Amino acid sequence: MNAPLPGPAGPRLSRRGLLGAATAVTVAATGLTATATLAATPAAAAEAGRRSAGDFVTARRGVLRLGGETFRFGGTNCYYLHQQSHYMIDSVLDDAAAMGLTVMRAWAFADGTEKSARPLQPKPYSYDEAAFDSLDYAVHKAGELGLRLVLPLVNNWPDYGGMQQYVNWFLGLPDDSYGEGVNHDRFYTDKAVKDCYKAYAKFVIRRRNRYTGLRYCDDPTVMAFELANEPRCRSDKSGATLLAWAGEMSAHVKSLAPRQLLAVGDEGFYGEAGQADYPYSDYEGTPWKKLVSLPAVDYATVHVYPQNWGETSGAKPGTDATGWGTKWINDHLRDGRALGKPVVVEEFGLQIDAGRDIPDSAARDRAYAAWTDAVRTGGGAGDQFWLLTSRVDDGSFYPDYDGHRIVWNNDPANPTRAAAQLFSAHAKAMTAAS
């Protein structure tokens, strides 16, 4: 998910605020209540034994591997699994499996009481076992279906609390996540903040799942942990601050989960001084190549949102969102090969908007076909579209809060039917290419 484009190109509609509202609306609409903690049953223990013998996905020589073979995937994102009912979790994971998707990225954070209906960490060093039921169940359900999960440990954005919540807890500074980020960026340097983040990461990684009997770090269903969702450090455009934090935290997380993959979770901004093109520039203080090169980082991540970043004909004459996105993907695939790290395009999306190069669903589907083809033919390890949603507790479909929703539903009236089928076919092609 992405924030508005900064600078003179003008504001873009932020999905952050929309998704913050989505959390409250969905919880209110579904009447969600916490599920009681369950002891591991004998059947669950037996399942745990079978899964503990399963293979972890590994990274070696620029590719992901599973069971001695190259592992490539088509996947998706669904941010709400950690907050919702078993019915909602079942709905979206069943749909993912039916599509042939093999990897899903889902939040493993919810910090503070102001931005989350069911915080996992209501206050520093305090973890709500009842609230963890949804995440535990999602890991269990994904394992039953043969899906792999990617779990980021904190949000750059204030949705579900995020980095700013840590800054508020320990420093009492106001939110400037969408400004120059001087307050927000204390997350990366303040010792008390860093210690609290490390403790939370340890709690999640070492916690024992009530449904599987396994610790998260012992469960191959969890393919990867990520340091953060879309970390940025705008106050230090050199990239040194974010790089130092990622170096410290990647070593910490890897020591806790040595068998799982680790990624930074950044958007792929190159961080190059003197570059006029925003995503290639140093504006956000995120030096992608240096982050990818950290020894504890197993694979590189890339996000693709040309509309949010001003890479359209309306914002920049002569630029086409589809073509720009294809070049962005190909540049990262090329550079990932040079760095010897697998590359995953872990978020991408377009909104239908005549003024931003995507006038209808057919144009969007053509862009998605071009981007997924670039990953498949360019040797990418995988890709995960933003975002797959399914039914909520009253049987209706989850609302399209940000204009990126994909629904697996063969009803001809489903406006995302063709896109869902495209992603399904792509995922199967990626699996066949492994």
Image (spheres, rainbow, N blue to C red):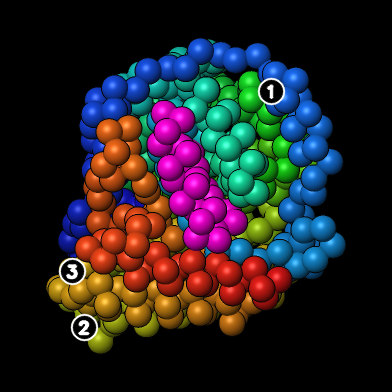
User: Between disc 1 and disc 3, whose residue precedes?
Assistant: 1
Is residue 403 on the magenta stretch? no
Main SS of the magenta segment?
Answer: helix
User: Between disc 3 and disc 2, whose residue precedes?
Assistant: 2
Vertical order, 423 against 243 (above or below): below
Q: Answer few, some or many: residues within 10 Å of disc 1's Cα (few below 14, many 20 plus, some between 14 and 19).
A: some
Q: Position of residue 208 (x, y in %)?
A: 69, 23
CA distance for labels 2 and 1: 53 Å
* Amino acid type, residue under disc 2 in the picture: Pro
The residue that disc 3 covers is: 353
| 205 on left or right of 406 | right
Give the magenta part as a residue range.
85-107
Asked whether residue 216 appears in the rendered view, the answer is yes
Vertical order, 15 against 353 (above or below): above
Is residue 99 on the magenta stretch? yes
CA distance for labels 1 and 3: 45 Å
Q: Position of residue 103 (x, y in %)?
A: 58, 54
The residue that disc 2 covers is: 317
| 352 on left or right of 238 | left
| 174 on left or right of 137 | left
Depth check: give the residue in front, 23 or 424: 424
Task: Point out the frontmost of discs 1 and 3.
Answer: 1
Secondary structure at badge 2 equals loop
Vertical order, 164 against 379 (above or below): above
The residue that disc 1 covers is: 208
Q: Position of residue 241 (x, y in %)?
A: 54, 45
Residue farthest to the bottom?
318
Depth check: give the residue in front, 265 or 168: 265
Q: Answer few, some or many: residues within 10 Å of disc 2's Cα (few below 14, many 20 plus, some between 14 and 19).
A: few
CA distance for labels 3 and 2: 16 Å
